Amino acid sequence: MVTTFTILLMITSLLMIVLILLHKGRGGGLSDMFGGGSSTGLGGSSVAERNLDRITVGTGVLWFTCIIALGLLLKAGA
């Protein structure tokens, strides 16, 4: 059981990295500090961005659940 959660945790960790890197930058970085970031935030989020947000949140919940389950399993086994 621990092996299953460990593999699932590794997969969701890699998926979280990829999904977060796919998100569009929303400003507020170093370029904005020096006046280089003139982003237009007037438009709403597209359907693809909203779906990417939902998938990222779902993956994050699964990732968090794996961490809690592994912690409980390892504590019970120790």
Image (spheres, rainbow, N blue to C red):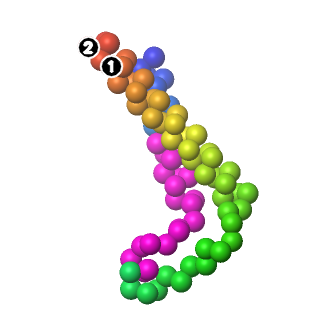
* Residue found farthest to the bottom: 35
Image coords of residue 13 (percent x, y)? 46, 42
Q: Which residues are magenta?
A: 13-32
- What amino acid is labelled 2 in the image? Ala
Magenta segment includes 19: yes
Do we see residue 13 in this rendering?
A: yes
Residue at 37% of width from left, 17% of height from top? 73
**Mark 2 lies on residue:** 78
> In the rendered picture of this protein, how many numbered marks are placed on residues?
2
Q: Is residue 77 above or below residue 37?
A: above
Q: Nearer the viewer, residue 28 or 55?
A: 28
75 left or right of 31?
A: left
Q: Residues within 10 Å of mark 1 (few under 14, many from 20)?
A: few
Q: Dot 1: what SS?
A: helix
Residue at 35% of width from left, 24% of height from top? 71
Image coords of residue 61 (percent x, y)? 52, 36
Image coords of residue 41 (percent x, y)? 61, 74
65 left or right of 71?
A: right
Do we see residue 11 in this rendering?
A: no
Q: Main secondary structure of the magenta part?
A: helix
Q: Nearer the viewer, residue 50 or 1?
A: 50
Image coords of residue 50 (percent x, y)? 67, 54
Pointers 1 and 2 in contact (CB under 8 A)? yes
* Residue found farthest to the front: 42
**Quadrant location of the N terminus?**
top left
**Mark 1 lies on residue:** 74
**Quadrant location of the C terminus?**
top left
How far apart, in angstroms, are the residues tagged by discs 1 and 2? 6 Å
Residue 36, labelled with which disc? none
